[in-house]
Amino acid sequence: MITLVPPAAKTPTTAPGPGGATVRAVIDGREVEVVIGTTILDAAGTCGVRIPTLCHHPDLPDAGVCRMCVVEVEGQRTLQPSCVFPITRDLEIHTHTPRVAAARRDIIDLLLGEHYGDCRTCARNGSCELQDLAAEYGLDRYRFGERTEPLFVRDDSGPSIVFDPDKCIQCLRCVRTCAELQGVRALGIAGRGAGVHVTTFADLPLGSEFCINCGQCVNRCPTGALTAVDVTDRVRAALDDPGKHVVIQTAPAPRAALGEEFGLAPGTPVTWQLTTALHELGFDKVFDTTFAADLTIIEEGVELIQRLHRALVQGAPDVALPMFTSCSPGWVKFLEHAFPDDLPHLSSCKSPQQMFGALIKTWYAERNGLDPADVVSVALMPCVAKKFEASRPEMTDSGYADVDLVLTARELARMLRRQGIDLPSEPPGDFDDPFGTATGSGVIFGATGGVMEAALRTVLEMVTGAPVENLYDHADITPVRGFDDVRLVELTIPDAVGPVPSIIAHLIPDWDWLRGVTLRVAVAHGTATARRVIDDIHAGGPFSTCHFIEFMACPGGCLGGGGQPIPTSLEIRRARARAIYAEDAAYGAAGLARKSHENPAVQRLYAELLTDGPGGATSHRLLHTGYTARGTFVPTDRRE
Amino acid sequence: MIIRTPLTLASVHPDIGLRVALARTPADVVEQVTRSGIRGRGGAGFPTGLKWRLASEAPAPDGRRHVVCNADEGEPGTFKDRALLSVVPDLVVEGMTIAAWAIGATSGVVYLRGEYVYLRDELESCLARRRAAGLLGNDILGTPGFCFDIHIRLGSGAYVCGEETALLESLEGRRGEPRNRFPYPVVRGLYQAPTIVNNVETLAWVPAVLARGADWFLGIGTPGSSGPKLLSVSGDVARPGVYEFPFGVTVRAVLEASGGEDARAVVVGGASGVCVPASDFSRGISYEDLCTGGAIIVLGPHRDLLDVAENFLEFFVDESCGQCTPCRLGNPVLLEGVRSLKRGECGPERLGELRRLGHTMKDASKCGLGQSSPNFFLSLVDRFGPEISDRVPV
């Protein structure tokens, strides 16, 4: 496994002492021993002292700008920001002296005076960190003024993200997220002094920016300044329209996270309660997107095999390798903007959401005697970029928008609350046919490495003709799992290959050319990481020799998506991943399929609809797509 | 700009200090500078020798260390660095060269205030002259391996870039915003390398300290503030200009020399400084009493101090980088407070809130700008009680 140099942003403020040497800190009289270089904030966390923060976020390099976390440090003339103050010697620290309390109160007062907007109708009412701090520290009036008029125009030009600068308190989490975590830099700072404000690159509307709609900024905004486009009213209206047949497909990642919106601990799955709740909301059918994930694996796996065959056997010089996954719409748009010359590397497969959408308006509608014009296709996603993806002009293979409306996990929680539905107490229910059956492979799409693992399970089995369990215990291909920014894994295909499965026999004559071949695959998540991987490929580094790379725009993959419950942190994402892998394992324990090619619904689809097989003409019409070279500076996707 | 007193620096023979320095080890030079007691003359007063020692001891993984001359003289009321760069540019460059020898730097930057662009040609020819004379470049003055050169970079007009870490950000091509302390620039400064940032005047005195000895320097000024100090005197005086006094000089003596005896108050330290009432004119200018980078703004009997406060706060509202909450949002509140005082609308309770806010800004702002912008206002409230209370409705 190869690990790239970590980004500079994550360099600790002070390197730990030699050999992890420790020092003693006394925080409000509590003594703690910490490694040299530990920040006061982290040290306080280890001894149960709470220090309020605002611009600090566990995923981001610290900026030290909001000054909420200032404390008194022995020997220092001024108060010190605990988030960026490294303890390098024995130190006495006080976190709630009158001086500290006065500063905290003034800072909250100043921020409240800058912040404009109605709390009661804000999307973040109840989850706003500024609101929480005002309550926690007993703010009772606006001492330093109250804004009564907006200063800015709300930017709702984007397909996924709404920016309301009047609610912004300049903590710069979004700017750091966009730059450091995602390597996009659509958001930046303009002006100075009291006129400083977060804005988009060159002040363009968000909808015409090199913004990948990943929504990671939304997940880290402490207030309601950055929110996702809300379509709950439109979904409700469709549900209330007796002339419409409204179906919803649900992605695996929200099921591992939605409980958080209802007070459950992160990592508590609510899959089966959710199906009941969605039926209660009024959806005519509740489908499982993992069916389409399985379908994606077949199509994408075969595409990979074809690319390898053409490159390795036929010696075709124009085959783009490594092949890149294409299920993450944020990642796809990132590549379209930042590396348009590399688009041939992208798999032509649509994402599971869009594959499913195309099938609902065609095959499903036809089988059920429905006019596709009367079918409303909704998707529950962990993602805000999926809203943009559904609106891409090419996603209309059925003759209609393949997916009409995309709900984030947060929006769905809002809809459930409006209806008085308490998700955790719902009785379990099943997904609806004909897409009801999923596999464990489809479920793990929700975690970084999941697409790769699912693809490997299927490809290895297709090639060897033997259970993948012969190579990996329980079919758990653990080397591709985890949260390292990037994982590079080598798998050697055994000498004993099997017969070519009938479904692709017309494409590939035999597997002899893969005997003993070492397959090099990689997994990357977060587009800042993706940028480093692509740069490495251009430089002829280790990733240029890969055959297949999974990219996810969001840190952690879909489970860390921009539409997931707020807050997020590595700990929370790990908990959600545990839920997802547990669901995969449960399929195995229950004797259900864990590999995409074993999905009976998928097999039936190839028998009934996609009769010319994976990568065939019908597949290409419904399940594959093309991409748009956007470039870095050209506003190409301005909304009409 | 007129130089009103003879400058000691004008009588310092060029390049003797550098030759003395090169005859010693770098550690000896640091020791000599430390012993002289010279402290930063930009206003903060950090001991120069200590700064150099920290930079020389900080690990430099790629062997690079930097000397930066802070010539971003932006404090309202300060113009003594401009005088030095005009009159004795060689001493400033010589001081940088000695600093480079002391800390093991190979590159230097003069960060020149944007408005001083007219000085650039003369500074460039100074550098060219010195390169030709073997005083810059490779093997300086025949010292094998001592290679050091300097280039000039212009600021773009932001006051905050005079703050050393904002200056470094600006040099690296980013927004001029102060960095978090820890590590200090002496450990990780320009491009992460150990860096000393010294004021023009500090660097200009260094050759004299080496040439005439630490004891000579220590013999001038006060125990805690050695050496002579250049002051920029402006405002309601008959003879504004640059003055040289030994540290410890009283405000009154400065007023007498410059023809401002009827002053009602003196601003020591420019817009970020404090307002000194006439009753305090016997106080001395030094690091241990009235600390300043050299700006003395004299306020005559006809001045409304709240006008001055309003003017200064307008300046800070505009010049704050806007990064941290207390400075970005506190300065506009103080400004509005001063305006309400002028209108007679600021009650005693409100005045108390503003005063506490001023202390929060001093306590919690990220850099010296926000930590000092309330100084003038606070000194008015604390030291001009009767005059303020006349404006406060009961």
Image (cartoon, coloured by chain):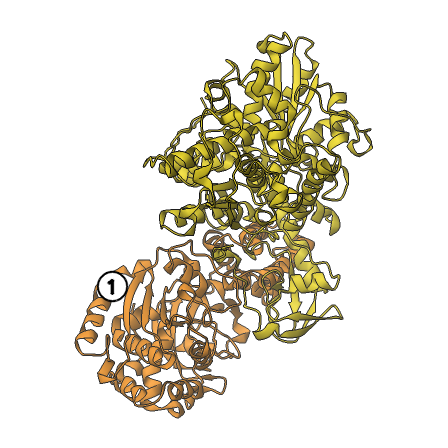
Residue at mark 1: chain = B
Q: Residue pushed farthest bottom?
A: B215
Residue drawn 77% across the image and 41% down it: A264
Residue in the foreground of this view, choosing between B299 and A520: A520
Q: Secondary structure at mark 1?
A: helix
Amino acid on which disc 1 is placed = Arg
Residue in the foreground of this view, choosing between B11 and A350: A350
Q: Quadrant of residue B326?
A: bottom right
Q: Quadrant of residue A512?
A: top left
Give the image location of residue A125, x and y in percent. Answer: 70, 37
Q: Quadrant of the C terminus of chain B?
A: bottom right
Is residue B243 shown left or right of residue A579? left
Chain A colour in the picture: yellow
How many tags in the picture?
1
Image height of A163 relative to B330, above or below: above
Image height of A333 relative to A568, above or below: above
- Residue A633 in view: no
Give the image location of residue B348, x and y in percent. Answer: 68, 56
Tag 1: Cα neighbours inside 10 Å, few (<14), some, or many (≥20)? some
Image height of A434 relative to B258, above or below: above
Chain B colour in the picture: orange
- Residue B120 in view: yes
Is residue A301 shown left or right of residue A342? right
Residue drawn 27% across the image and 60% down it: B117
Judging by the rendered image, the residue that carries numbered circle 1 is B120
Give the image location of residue B231, x and y in percent. Answer: 39, 74
